[in-house]
Image (spheres, rainbow, N blue to C red):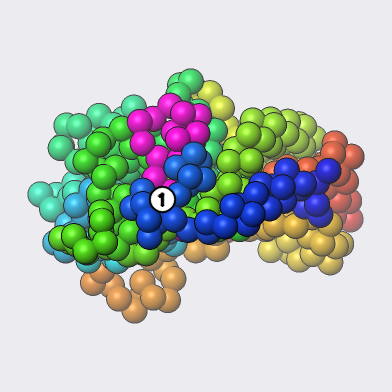
């Protein structure tokens, strides 16, 4: 039995009941490594991913901040990130007092372009943060080589790529550290918000555990700066149940995406799957809208999608234009031009052409996917 969105149900409710009956909602005051559920969830997640350590936090943004700090990113450093991502990939660099350097993306995969990264390396460069955008892994071989050759830290933002694979290996297992988000719209959730840092490095792991817990190991032994980024017992218990369903969720997400992609009209160009992407999870199906073929602008198409009510049929982002701007065009970054650098012509073009949908992530049936594609066709046929 599942509830409204079909992504959680009685199993999650039962485990939350157990947490309440046990009575420990957050046991960090007793144990700096967290309570039973937090530790169980971390262990299971690390095992599932195939890494040594998983450190839970309260959201993906906190995971980025913690990972950056744990990797010693500090004022004076430069961190290379792509400009088409959720804002916190970049803004958490600023939270560490470092400077953002935006590298351009590959126009086909939408992911950071290793050639662009190479050109931006300076003596101040400390880290590269590839984002595996909407389910497709970034070019990890080339990026790992660049990081190694230049003695740089590699931190994967895998928030949109849970269970995606590059050359048969899971996203999140390549860098010195990687981060995941369990916000409600992600493939699995921890009661609406949550995050995880993963690493094989004992020192990074220990620093992450301390940074999320006000830098304390045991109460008063604070010897650097930390935050309260802890996950609660109920969140972890909820996440543990969700993790047991992850494979089923991902299979459904991919099956629905592939089913709809095969049926798209010519004006909607499906996502390019790089040969190194052995598993694209289609966190979002990110297409390109061909205005010439369609005989109408992308924005007019989206207006009609809304008018037709296609965006009211499903929860989530449903059908939209994806990120509307590169991060450095957002007002804050335009006002504070001293905190970043970079010009990314390929990235600037994509928001004008993108057509994204994520119906596939919800428990849609093939009938739902048909309804979506038929809706697209009807709009285009009317012209
Ligand atoms: C690529 C990326 N990075 C970071 C985040 C931040 O995660 P959260 O929303 O859990 O803070 C998200 C989530 O929206 C994301 O998609």
Q: How many marks?
A: 1
Q: Is residue 306 left or right of residue 108?
A: right
Is the residue marked by circle 1 packed among few (<14), some (14-19), or many (20+) residues within 10 Å?
many
Q: Quadrant of the C terminus?
A: bottom right
Q: Where is residue 234 shown, x and y percent of the image?
A: 58, 54
Residue name at image x 56 percent, y 27 percent: 279
Q: Is residue 131 left or right of residue 233?
A: left
Residue name at image x 48 percent, y 45 percent: 36
Residue name at image x 77 percent, y 32 percent: 259
Magenta part of the protein: which range?
42-59
Q: Is residue 250 magenta?
A: no
Label 1 belongs to which residue? 34
Quadrant in the rendering for residue 272: top right
Quadrant in the rendering for residue 309: bottom right
Q: Where is residue 356 shown, x and y percent of the image?
A: 65, 51
**Residue located farthest toward the top when viewing the structure as drawn:** 168
Q: Is residue 334 left or right of residue 216?
A: right
User: Relative to 263, does residue 69 appear above or below in the rendering?
Assistant: below
């Amino acid at each position: 039995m599942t509830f409204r969105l079909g992504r959680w149900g009685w199993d999650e409710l039962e485990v939350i009941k157990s947490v309440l009956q046990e009575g420990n909602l957050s046991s960090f005051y007793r144990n700096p490594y967290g309570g039973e559920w937090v530790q169980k969830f971390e262990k299971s997640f690390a095992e599932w991913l195939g890494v040594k350590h998983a450190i839970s936090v309260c959201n993906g943004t906190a995971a980025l901040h913690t990972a950056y700090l744990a990797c010693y990113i500090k004022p004076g450093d430069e961190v290379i990130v792509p400009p088409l991502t959720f804002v916190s990939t970049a803004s958490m660099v600023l939270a560490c007092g470092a400077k953002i350097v935006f590298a351009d993306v590959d126009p086909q995969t939408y992911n950071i372009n290793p050639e662009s990264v190479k050109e931006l390396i300076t003596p101040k460069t400390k880290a590269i943060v590839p984002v595996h955008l909407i389910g497709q892994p970034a070019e990890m071989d080339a990026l790992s080589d660049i990081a190694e050759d230049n003695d740089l830290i590699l931190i994967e933002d895998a928030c949109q790529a849970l269970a995606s694979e590059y050359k048969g290996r899971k996203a999140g297992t390549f860098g010195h550290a990687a981060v995941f988000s369990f916000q409600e719209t992600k493939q699995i959730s921890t009661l609406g918000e949550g995050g995880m840092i993963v690493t094989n490095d004992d020192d990074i792991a220990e620093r992450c555990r301390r940074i999320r817990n006000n830098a304390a190991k045991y109460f008063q032994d604070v010897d650097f700066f930390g935050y309260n980024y802890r996950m609660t017992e109920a969140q972890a218990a909820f996440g543990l149940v969700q993790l047991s369903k992850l494979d089923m969720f991902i299979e459904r997400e991919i099956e629905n995406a592939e089913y709809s992609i095969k049926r798209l009209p010519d004006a909607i160009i499906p996502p390019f799957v790089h040969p190194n992407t052995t598993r694209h999870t289609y966190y979002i199906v990110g297409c390109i809208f061909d205005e010439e073929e369609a005989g109408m602008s992308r924005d007019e198409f989206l207006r009609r999608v809304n008018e037709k009510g296609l965006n009211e049929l499903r929860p989530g982002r449903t059908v939209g234009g994806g990120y509307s701007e590169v991060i450095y065009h957002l007002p804050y970054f335009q006002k504070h031009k001293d905190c970043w650098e970079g010009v990314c012509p390929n990235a600037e073009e994509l928001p004008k052409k993108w057509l994204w949908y994520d119906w596939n992530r919800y428990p849609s049936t093939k009938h739902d996917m048909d309804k979506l594609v038929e809706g697209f066709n009807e709009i285009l046929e009317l012209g």
